[in-house]
Amino acid sequence: MAEYLFSNNIFEMNSSSVKTFNKHDYVRSPMNYIGGKYKLLPQLLPLFPRKIHTFVDLFCGGCDVGININAEKIIFNDNLSYLIDLYKEFTLLSKEQIIFHIKSRIAQYNLSLTNDEGYKNLRKHYNTERNPLDLFVLVAYSFNHQIRFNNSHEFNNPFGKNRSSFNVKMEQNLFSFLNLLHCKKIDFVSCNFDEFDLTVCTAQDFVYCDPPYLITTGTYNDGKRGFTGWNDKEEIKLLNILSRLNKRNIKFGLSNVLTHKGKKNDILLHWINSNDFIVTHLSKDYSNSNYQIKNKDVQITDEVLITNYLP
């Protein structure tokens, strides 16, 4: 386990002791999900409880964290129901069936790095028929491999011309992901975080939360994508839920940022200090961020894991 520098309830990663990241250590999700935690796994996972009965991933997104967890049972939840439908389809079909469907759709619509019309035709077909696997094919060829819906719940991410395709790396990630998915006890649920039934959790379980970050620029925060957005009210609601878990002696981990581009999450900081929770600062390189600004000091993002137990 990595070493930590102790100061009140603040822990900082000692860079000399952080495990060297090896891409072969963990499975990467085939979904390029905004805010995915794949690069942070070598820092996050050693901070989690060593023995977990049920792991609840309350905002699962691309499932990078949960798929790499060793637990007797894993529950993935996300309010994006079409994403959960895709994961459920992944569990029901064999790898061969899934790959056959993907490659059949690619051939049927003549999908390529340049065929914008083929992509739009498949997008129209998906928005009519809602075949879960077609969503994955669309993501493979969409701009930055991202998922985006409008208020009518129509997939509307643009074509990733000369950038996106179902390439060898994406296929490898899919195979590795499916291998773990098919050998673990996993349930998928789709509801808003405040509707998830956490009353069944016990002291042997662990609840992990990676919500939208209140002070960042993610488009999923605005509530204009046909699904619940994120604002002060949602932030407070989640923190209250975690406080109730703490009173029941149920361990939780919350990924978030304390500062970003000169902004502070005062709601989060007040909650941490009021409850004396543990804050572990994580190290992440944002040099390739699409949101670079000239003032490097202001650009620093303080990404953390907040826990109600000593890692």
Image: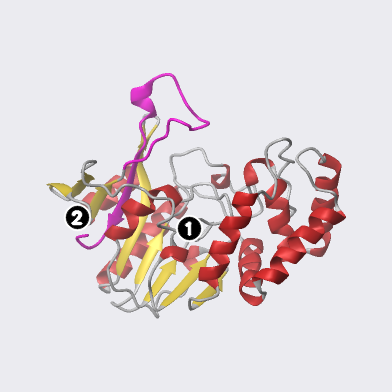
**Is residue 62 inside the magenta stretch?**
no
The kind of secondary structure element at disc 2 is loop
Residue 235 in percent (x, y) is at: 42, 52
Q: How many other residues sit within 10 Å of disc 2, few (<14), some (14-19) or many (≥20)?
A: some
Mark 1 to mark 2 CA distance (whole Å): 28 Å
Residue 263 in percent (x, y) is at: 37, 33
Q: Magenta region: which residues?
A: 283-311
Q: Quadrant of the N terminus?
A: bottom left
Answer whether residue 157 is visible to the viewer in this image: yes
In-front residue for pair 211/46? 46
The kind of secondary structure element at disc 1 is loop
Q: Is 194 located above or below residue 200 in the figure?
A: above
Residue 97 in percent (x, y) is at: 72, 71
| Residue kind at label 1, given as amino acid type | Asp
Q: Is residue 229 left or right of residue 148?
A: left
Question: Which residue is found at the position 30% from the left and 77% from the top?
Answer: 204
Q: Quadrant of the C terminus?
A: bottom left
Q: Is residue 181 left or right of residue 273?
A: right
| Residue kind at label 2, given as amino acid type | Asp
Question: Which residue is found at the position 71% from the left and 46% from the top?
Answer: 141
Q: How many other residues sit within 10 Å of disc 1, few (<14), some (14-19) or many (≥20)?
A: many
Q: Which residue is mark 2?
A: 276
Q: Quadrant of residue 198?
A: bottom left
Answer whether residue 149 is visible to the viewer in this image: no
